[in-house]
Amino acid sequence: MKRAGLDSPLRFTTKLGGAHRETPKDGTIKHRFAPDDIAAQSLLASQTMANAVTHFEIFAAQPARLAEFYRQLLGWQIDKAPGIDYWRIKTDSAAGQGINGGLTFRPIPEPHSWVHYLHVESLDHVIEQVLNLGGAVLRPKTAVPKTAWYAVVSDPEGNIFAVWQPDPTAMPPIEPED
């Protein structure tokens, strides 16, 4: 059995949560992810390569309306996650080659663009580096419950990106009741 992008037949495939780990005869490890499983993508990214793009998010004032826009425009599969205001985006469900993402309410006033997330080993260290190198923190370190920590930052020219540190124990702090 051959797959696009692999030079040798697959020797075996093991399933890791929502992801697949494929090992060709040459011993290298390739990963394939369930199209809507950002947590599994993030977990496996943490085991493979730092600073890799993990996913994208699109921010909106009316996410349900924008989800329909992208469904019709690009044919993406977009489903609302149960219990939260978050829509999962599968960009290439047939081939499994596309980068997937999400759509949610706008957490910061700008940008009016997509935000790409970079996997990092230490979110705190990267935030410190961004500030030391003349960048800015637009959204401070925030928990995605039981998935990761992230922050939205900009470079010295104002270009925005997010940094993402997988952490299955991430939880927002408990806020006191008034």
Image: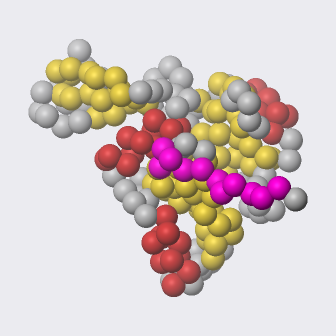
Q: Residue at x 56, y 29 (%)?
A: 36
Q: Is residue 73 visible?
A: no
Quadrant of the rendering where the N terminus is positioned: top left
**Can you say which quadrant of the picture contains the C terminus?**
bottom right
Snapshot quadrant of residue 134: bottom right
**Residue 98 horizontal/vertical position (percent):** 50, 34
| Rendered location of residue 133, percent (x, y) | 51, 83
Horizontal side of 37 relative to 16 (left or right) equals right
**43 relative position to 148: left or right:** left
Residue at the farthest front position: 177
In the image, taking residue 119 as reference, residue 103 lies left or right, namely right
Residue 144, compared with residue 77, is above or below; it is: below
- The stretch of residues the image draws in magenta is 167-177
Colouring style: secondary structure
- Does 177 sit above or below residue 9? below
State the residue in front, 126 or 53: 126
Q: Residue at x 54, y 50 (%)?
A: 170
Left or right: residue 7 versus residue 161 is left
Residue furthest to the left in view is 26
Q: Give the residue displayed 58% in from the left and 74% down from the top.
A: 155
- Main SS category, magenta section: loop
Q: Is residue 171 magenta?
A: yes
Of the pair 130 and 114, the residue shown nearer to us: 130
Image coords of residue 164 (percent x, y): 52, 55
x, y percent for residue 143: 61, 53
- When asked about the image quadrant of residue 31, the answer is top left
Q: How many marks?
A: 0
Residue plotted at (75% across, 57% down): 175
Residue 154 seen in render: yes
